């Protein structure tokens, strides 16, 4: 399957050749431009069939994602679209985004498209709203039937200034929030001048966006611009009917960019299309020819031109620096910086944070993710020190108690550098098998010939120096000898163990690693034996693989590692085996190479070759380098690899896939490498390091190889496709995927889902903590996990039936399509207790009697733990929440301590007698959780007195819990704009009061306040509110429910007599610059507006620190309204400010507070 670019080139060449052969230049003159109708016909083919898949799977989701924060931050969005064609892609955005677009302008030179576009946008006055793609436009769309022209291209290339007038462009000073080029940059040269021009047309705010979608070849001339976000879709295709001459003619002319009049040339073009297009890849359209059309997105903000600020602070490397990886070689980074000091790395991070852009990190350059188009790459090559620290008694090299030898390696070192220097000191570190591979190998795992003996490279990491991508600080994690700690480095305390855990297998996502400290081992001598066994395809292979796999996995000692290679040699399938033996017998015999036999060598018979080598010499013993295909030592090849973990390689389905893969390899050089695992790799529990996948016998590296001079050709494309095809077939049979080199490429997504074993949810949480602004956006795709949409604490005394109710509620919610989980908070303690004491965890969790036996020691174990780790309860709570990242609703039972942030809670109540009976019969379903005495009032109470009344429990879930998922609440949340940088640079402001300014916002909010109120309206005498936010929502609500209003204002604004109390400034006022000196103020309420002893509902817009609410409650107290007679409803709550704690401290813990919405952050 050819790419569209190569098709275009071939069509043009053929047309030229035909013209010359016919000696009539006009026959194929590129000067016959396409008419509007021809252009439109060609465009249709591109956007239909598989072309539409590119829109569905890439353009629309990526555009929605990149626009969402911008749209979220404003109530009105203006968009300019360049070359939208007959209909804008904006029409396919989610409803909530489309409704924000209030102004739409476009430049579309094709008159036919202009007419279609105008019809499509429709007139809001005449078209039913549902059919209008942009339903909230406030003015008629402005569609200019002219090309978009850069204002002045002179400054970019110094010549050929092309200046447009304001008349050409509409209003020259017009500004937009977003400007979109979707496949419309063809013919714009140089492209960066058009983007710069568009950047000048953004409104003067930070997060306005210019978004470009284009075929992949675009990045070559966006020189010097730094993108905010980039994405690629390498698997995009375009197809056209193979047997429809007319369609092929339209398609070919569109791709070539001109028309030909001679039938012979058209016929030749059709032949070209049929010959170059693939057919086998489009199973749904067997009569179509398919072309590869990889796509990229680049989104720019006004910070796109910020590179010079970085360039003056950090040394630059050659932007055309040669890297090993073929994909990376084809990408033009915005710049490659080469820090020579840690403070340079810090500068890079601070610059990236300030300008809202991502970075890539360049280690050994073997992955496709070290360079990305228009992203700054940080080349760590200068950090290439290797330091050997001899074993010490008592571990004085660091705070760690490890006292064996250490090796400290800079992140710019290659595997060969480390092994070589360590060897000189009689030591080694188990790294990968190739000497040129860089830090990426040990930061993502590191599988090598010593892995069975010492574990993975990441298992040997005991410490690291990392530049935080959250703050730019230098962090020392774990064991970093004091003389190697950079000045000013900080430690993380509580979170240090999390970061070290993440570094062991997934480091590339969590910071820029400057150096790591490895545990070192005694240097090894290897006896290396090779076998090459030619096989017939079919059963013989299966047998050989099965017996090799079984014997190797079961009977080889950990001092031996046997790798297998499946490859083709002159149409013969070969099984190559290399055994690396470091056993003492092999070492003893190193002078006279005659290693001891072992079960594998006995099975394979006489070996073909035998060498005795040291840790450096072993690099040359890889069969790929030394034997396969005649040896590749000097060959100039490129490769593409993906690696899956397999258990039983001889099992029929696996063996058949492996053999079939070699049989249909697209180049003779492609092969499968099976690296042996087991032993020390599996000694480490899956969740004790980020690496996660531990239970496998062989790591199958599917290796696509082609001659380097064929990079970017169909051959390279076919090899990459082959790797993904084989990986896809093996995936369901695998026991995990190696996370190394998986990136944001959509083809990696299914593989990524199986990487890191059980650790993905935790990694995703940590990503949010350690890389909150996605500075390392191009590493392994760890999508930000959504918080559970609802966390319900199920509280109540022992015997009330908490677990029984929680299980039923989870089942009801699950039936309604929500993923609900019940988790007991005490499980974490029980697990730790069982591990420490040898108690039976299963019985501890399930048997009440067994737990009773252990109750006292369990309690004292927990108390001891808390003494050592005072934040243990919080850690447990977060662990439970993090562990349920995939759940929509998390029901937490057994909570004894206060949750770190207040959550929705339901207290299950039953009479003392019922509880006593249930406890006697042990059917409470509470599995022995302790009683809990709430220091606050629960949001809801469920009376569970009637044992076995399942219907009532279900009804409660349907009525009370499901209401939280009402579509109207989601709509309300989407009306709250997020305003970055207000009231302070580092804060994001949620404009809750702004709901009232949105069309329909106040009405929606009022009706939700009414319907969601957990109390009884008939019992409320007065609705009270404090200026200003409260006035808006409370007035509307009071009118709707027909209840009198009590207004609370700043002192001096209401006629006396009044009640009056002091009030600390609210959260936002204390930050507003004009009020930075804000001191305590007073609030007042007229004396006669609330009768003594009345029941009052307080309504406010926001609950943050709770200072205002506490003052209001005190004021109501002055008026004779006790706290038990007060309920509170707020539109939005920000639990991070711990208002509930303040309420409790001020004695208002018993007040029922309900929030319609909850937001993280400020
Ligand atoms: C020929 C070859 C042989 C291989 N052999 C083995 C093997 O034997 N065992 C094995 O386990 N794997 C092996 N691999 C896979 C290898 O581990 C990965 O390709 C690895 O990503 C390469 O790392 P690098 O530093 O060379 O590449 P790079 O592309 O420079 O880096 C890889 C990733 O790490 C990130 N990164 C690099 N340095 C840092 C840093 N200091 N801080 C944060 N992030 C950083 C990069 O941004 C990138 O995402 C091999 C790959 C190839 C191509």
Image: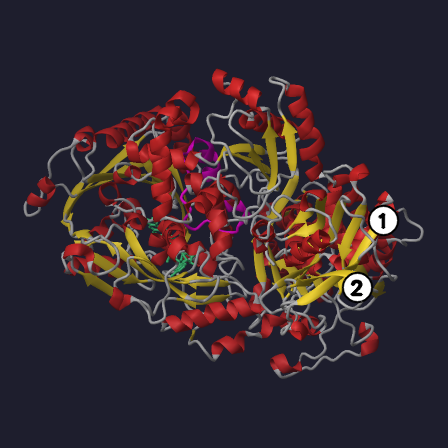
The quarter of the image holding the C terminus is bottom right
Residue nearer the viewer, 700 or 60:
60
Query: 522 or 935, which lies in front?
Result: 935
Q: Is residue 483 left or right of residue 137?
A: left
Could you tell me residue 75's position as x and y percent? 76, 60
Beta carbon of the mark 2 residue lies under 8 A of ligand 1: no
1148 drawn magenta: no
From mark 2 to mark 1, how far is it between C-alphas?
52 Å
Q: Write down the residue under mark 1.
A: 1044
Judged from this view, the residue extending furthest toward the right is 126
Horizontal and vertical percent for residue 769? 49, 54
How many residues crowd around disc 2 within 10 Å: few (fewer than 14), some, or many (20 or more)?
many
The answer as to whether callout 1 falls within 8 Å of ligand 1 is no
Q: Position of residue 626 (x, y in %)?
A: 25, 49
Range of the magenta residues?
A: 726-748
Corner quadrant of residue 980? bottom right
Relative to 966, residue 990 above or below? below
Residue at the spot of label 2: 106
Residue 740 counted in the magenta span: yes
Q: Position of residue 623 (x, y in %)?
A: 26, 45
**Above or below, 345 relative to 549:** below
């Amino acid at each position: 399957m050819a790419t569209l670019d190569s098709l275009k080139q071939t069509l043009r060449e053929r047309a030229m050749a035909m013209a010359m052969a016919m000696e009539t230049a006009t026959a194929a003159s590129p000067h016959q431009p396409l008419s509007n109708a021809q252009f439109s016909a060609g465009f249709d083919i591109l956007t239909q069939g598989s072309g539409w898949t590119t829109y569905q799977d890439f353009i629309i989701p990526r555009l929605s994602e990149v626009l969402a924060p911008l749209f979220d931050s404003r109530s009105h969005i203006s968009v300019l679209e360049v070359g939208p064609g007959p209909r804008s892609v904006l029409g396919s955005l989610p409803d909530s985004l489309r409704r924000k677009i209030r102004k739409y302008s476009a430049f579309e030179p094709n008159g036919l498209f202009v007419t279609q576009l105008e019809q499509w946008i429709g007139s809001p006055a005449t078209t039913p709203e549902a059919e209008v793609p942009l339903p909230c436009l406030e003015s008629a769309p402005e569609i200019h039937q002219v090309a978009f022209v850069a204002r002045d291209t002179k400054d970019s290339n110094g010549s050929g200034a092309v200046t447009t007038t304001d008349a050409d462009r509409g209003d020259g000073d017009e500004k937009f929030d977003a400007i979109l080029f979707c496949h419309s940059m063809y013919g714009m040269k140089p492209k960066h001048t058009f983007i710069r021009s568009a950047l000048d047309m953004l409104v003067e705010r930070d997060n306005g966006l210019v978004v470009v979608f284009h075929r992949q070849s675009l990045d070559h001339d966006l020189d010097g611009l730094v993108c905010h976000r980039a994405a690629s879709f390498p698997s995009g295709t375009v197809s056209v009917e193979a047997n429809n001459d007319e369609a092929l003619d339209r398609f070919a002319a569109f791709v070539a960019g001109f028309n030909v009049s001679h039938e012979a040339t058209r016929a030749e073009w059709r032949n070209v299309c049929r010959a170059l297009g693939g057919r086998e890849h489009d199973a749904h359209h067997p009569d179509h020819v398919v072309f590869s059309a990889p796509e990229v997105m680049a989104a720019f903000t006004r910070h796109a031109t910020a590179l010079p600020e970085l360039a003056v602070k950090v040394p630059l490397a050659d932007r055309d620096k040669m890297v090993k990886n073929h994909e990376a070689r084809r990408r033009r980074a915005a710049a490659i910086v080469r820090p020579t000091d840690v403070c340079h790395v810090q500068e890079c991070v601070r610059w990236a944070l300030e300008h809202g852009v991502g970075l890539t990190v360049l280690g050994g350059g073997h992955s496709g993710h070290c360079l990305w188009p228009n992203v700054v790459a940080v080349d760590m090559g200068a950090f290439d020190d290797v330091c050997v620290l001899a074993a010490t008694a008592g571990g004085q090299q660091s705070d760690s108690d490890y006292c064996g030898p250490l090796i400290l390696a800079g992140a710019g070192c290659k595997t060969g550098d480390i092994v070589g220097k360590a060897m000189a000191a009689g030591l080694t570190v188990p790294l990968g098998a190739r000497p040129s591979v860089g830090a990426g190998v040990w930061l993502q795992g590191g599988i090598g010939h010593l892995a069975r003996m010492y574990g993975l490279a990441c298992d040997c990491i005991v410490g690291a120096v990392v530049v935080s991508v959250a703050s730019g600080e230098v962090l020392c994690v774990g064991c970093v000898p004091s003389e190697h700690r950079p000045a000013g480095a900080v430690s993380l305390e509580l979170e240090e163990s999390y970061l070290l855990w993440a570094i062991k297998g997934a480091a590339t996502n969590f910071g820029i690693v400057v150096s790591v400290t490895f545990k070192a081992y005694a240097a090894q001598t290897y006896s290396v034996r090779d076998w090459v066994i030619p096989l017939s395809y079919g059963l013989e292979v299966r047998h050989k693989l099965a017996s090799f796999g079984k014997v190797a996995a079961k009977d080889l000692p950990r001092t031996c590692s046997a790798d297998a290679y499946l490859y083709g040699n002159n149409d013969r399938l070969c099984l190559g085996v290399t055994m690396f033996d470091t056993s003492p017998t092999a070492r003893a015999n190193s002078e006279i190479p005659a290693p001891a036999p072992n079960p594998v060598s006995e099975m394979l018979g006489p070996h073909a070759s035998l060498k005795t080598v040291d840790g450096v010499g072993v690099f040359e013993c890889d069969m790929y380098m030394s034997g396969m295909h005649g040896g590749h030592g000097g060959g100039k090849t490129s490769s593409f690899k993906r690696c899956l973990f397999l258990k039983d390689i001889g099992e029929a389905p696996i063996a058949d896939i492996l053999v079939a893969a070699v049989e249909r390899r697209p180049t003779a050089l492609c092969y499968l490498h099976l690296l042996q695992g087991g032993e020390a790799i599996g000694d480490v529990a899956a969740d004790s390091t980020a690496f996660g996948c531990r239970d496998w016998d062989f790591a199958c590296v599917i290796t696509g190889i082609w001659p380097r001079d064929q990079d970017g050709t169909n051959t390279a494309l076919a090899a990459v496709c082959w790797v993904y095809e084989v990986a896809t077939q093996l995936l369901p049979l695998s026991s995990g995927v190696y996370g190394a080199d998986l990136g944001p490429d959509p083809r990696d997504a299914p593989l990524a889902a199986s990487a890191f074993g059980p650790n993905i949810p935790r990694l995703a949480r940590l990503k949010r903590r350690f890389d909150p602004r996605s500075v390392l956006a191009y590493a392994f795709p760890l999508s930000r996990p959504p918080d559970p949409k609802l966390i319900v604490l199920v509280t109540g005394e022992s015997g009330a039936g908490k677990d029984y109710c929680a299980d039923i509620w989870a089942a009801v919610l699950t039936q309604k399509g929500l993923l609900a989980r019940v988790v007991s908070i005490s499980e974490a303690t029980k697990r730790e207790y069982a591990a420490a004491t040898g108690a039976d965890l299963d019985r501890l969790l399930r048997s009440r009697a067994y737990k009773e036996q252990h109750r006292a020691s369990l309690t004292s174990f927990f108390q001891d733990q808390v003494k050592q780790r005072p934040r243990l309860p919080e850690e447990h709570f977060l662990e439970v929440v993090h562990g349920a990242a995939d759940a929509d609703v998390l029901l937490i039972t057994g909570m004894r301590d206060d949750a770190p942030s207040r959550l929705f809670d339901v207290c299950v109540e039953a009479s003392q007698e019922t509880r006593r009976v249930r406890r006697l019969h042990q059917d409470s379903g509470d599995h022995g959780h302790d009683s809990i005495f709430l220091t606050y009032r629960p949001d809801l109470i469920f009376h569970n007195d009637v044992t076995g009344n399942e219907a009532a429990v279900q009804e409660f879930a349907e009525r009370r819990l499901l209401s939280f998922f009402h579509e109207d609440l989601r709509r309300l949340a989407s009306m709250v704009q997020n305003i970055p940088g207000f009231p302070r640079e580092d804060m994001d402001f949620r404009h809750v009061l702004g709901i009232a300014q949105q069309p329909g916002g106040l009405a929606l909010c009022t009706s939700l306040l009414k319907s969601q109120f957990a109390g009884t309206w008939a019992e409320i005498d007065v609705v009270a509110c404090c200026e200003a936010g409260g006035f808006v929502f409370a007035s509307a609500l009071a009118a709707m429910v027909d209840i009198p209003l009590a207004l609370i204002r700043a002192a001096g604004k209401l006629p006396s007599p009044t009640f009056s109390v002091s009030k600390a400034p609210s959260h936002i006022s204390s930050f507003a610059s004009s009020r930075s000196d804000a001191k305590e103020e007073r609030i007042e309420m007229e004396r006669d507006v609330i009768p003594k002893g009345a029941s009052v509902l307080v309504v406010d817009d926001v609950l943050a620190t709770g200072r205002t609410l506490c003052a209001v409650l005190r004021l109501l107290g002055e008026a004779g309204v006790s706290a038990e007679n007060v309920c509170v409803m707020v539109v939005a709550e920000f639990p991070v400010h711990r208002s509930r704690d303040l309420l409790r401290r001020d004695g208002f813990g018993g007040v029922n507070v309900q929030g319609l919405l909850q937001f993280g952050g400020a």
